[in-house]
Each structure stands twice: as structure tokens, then as C-alpha cells.
Image (spheres, grey):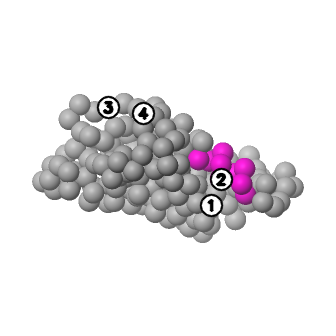
Amino acid sequence: MTLAEALKQKIKINGIFFETATIISATLLLALSAQFVFFIPFSPVPFTFQTLVVLLLGAALGSKRGAACVGLYLLQGTAGLPVFSGGRSGLIHLAGPTGGYLVGFFFAAYLAGFLAQKEFDRNIVKTAFLMITGNAVIYIFGALWLGIFTGYSRVIQIGVAPFIISDVLKTAMAILMLPSAWKILGGK
């Protein structure tokens, strides 16, 4: 069971309305998280809150809903809606230096959701594992793609290392948020 399913039971709502409202609301939250942008002078990859939101949404929604949310977000951005970092959009942005991170979001959300369905979002240690593995997926996709643009000798320096401290802080936030949400909903 995921947080979304626990909430659905708590408020006693079912059907396509809940599913649609959940996915659309989640894509809006993800788009909003992309608008808090801090550019790093030596890196083409900006700091945003997207990684935190992607992994939290994946964990809260489950593997299928989490992946659907990120997939819809990617479609929205590719179609021209200004949902990518700094209000950017278009296929050119998805194909650019940060495209690997964006694609990695899809797989990371699925993984976070899968782990949450196995109750990895219920305590501190398992939530830390969920966040670390989800971030690793994002880094792998992002770094591999970024290396095409910057050269692989620099990819750790400009595409991974600058974000480790912020991802540790985001992981700490998730460690507080996910198990607490379960306590609020009266779950395990």
C-alpha cells in the first residue's frame, strides 16, 4: 500500500476522478519544484527541488502512478508547456545537457514507488535507502547523457559532485516526511 492508497481509503474516494486528480496534481507539484532554480556557474545542470519531489511522488503514489506522473510531466514539457527548470520547454530541452536527468526522473519515480510498495517509506533507514537509490538512478542517467555534451572526464565534477550535499539534505527531509505521513494517516 502507498500513501496515495491509504489516503484514498481514508477519504473514501475511488475511481477515475481520484486517479486523474492525483496524477495531474502531482505533475503540477513537479512543475512547480522545477521553478525554484539556482544556477551553478560552472555546470549546465541547475539546482532545483525536482529530485526531492520526484522521489517523494514516486514513494507516495507507487511505481505506476509515480512513473505516470513523471511521464506526463515530460510530455507536457516536450509539448511546449513551461514546466522544465526555469520555465523552459520543448524537445530541445529534453535533448540537451540536462535531458538525462529528466529521463532518469521517470525511472527513479518508478523505483521509489516500487520500494514504497515494499514498505521502504515507513522508517528512517529504509527511507534513506529509497532516497539514495532513487538519487543514484537520476545521477546515472544524468551523468551518462551529460557526458556527451561535456566529456566524461568532467561529468562527476560538474554533474554529480555539486549536488551531493543538497541531495543529502533532501534525503534528510524525506526521512522526516515519509514516515511522518504514515503516522498521520494512521498506517504502520
Looking at numbered disc 2 in the image, what kind of residue is underneath it?
Ile
Amino acid found under the numbered disc labelled 3: Phe
Dot 4: what SS?
helix
Residue holding disc 3? 39
Between marks 4 and 3 in the image, the one whose residue lies nearer the viewer: 4
Neighbourhood count class around disc 1 (C-alpha, 10 Å): few under 14, some 14–19, many 20 upward: many
Residue 120 placement (x, y as % from top left): 57, 62
Tag 2 near tag 4, CB within 8 Å: no
Which quarter of the picture shows residue 46? top left
Q: CA distance from mark 1 to mark 4?
A: 25 Å
Residue at point 62%, 61% (across, down): 65
Task: Work out how far the residue at label 3 is from the one at label 2, CA to CA, in angstroms.
Answer: 29 Å
The reply, left or right, for residue 79 in relation to residue 28 is: left
What type is the residue that disc 4 sits on?
Answer: Gly
Question: Which is more N-terminal, label 4 or label 1?
Answer: 1
Say whether marks 1 and 3 touch (CB < 8 Å). Answer: no
- How far is the residue under mark 2 from the one under mark 4? 22 Å
Q: Earlier in the sequence, mark 1 or mark 3?
A: 3
According to the picture, the residue beneath numbered tag 2 turns out to be 23
Start-end of magenta stretch: 19-27
Crowding at mark 3 (Cα within 10 Å: few <14, some 14-19, many 20+): few
Q: Secondary structure at mark 1?
A: helix
- Which of labels 1 and 4 is toward the front? 4
- In the picture, measured across the screen, residue 153 lies left or right of residue 97, that is left
Disc 2 to disc 1, how far (Cα)?
A: 7 Å
Q: Position of residue 148 (x, y in %)?
A: 20, 56
In the rendered image, which quarter contains the C terminus? bottom right
The span from disc 4 to disc 3 (Cα, nearest Å) is: 10 Å
**Circle 1 is placed at which residue position?**
65
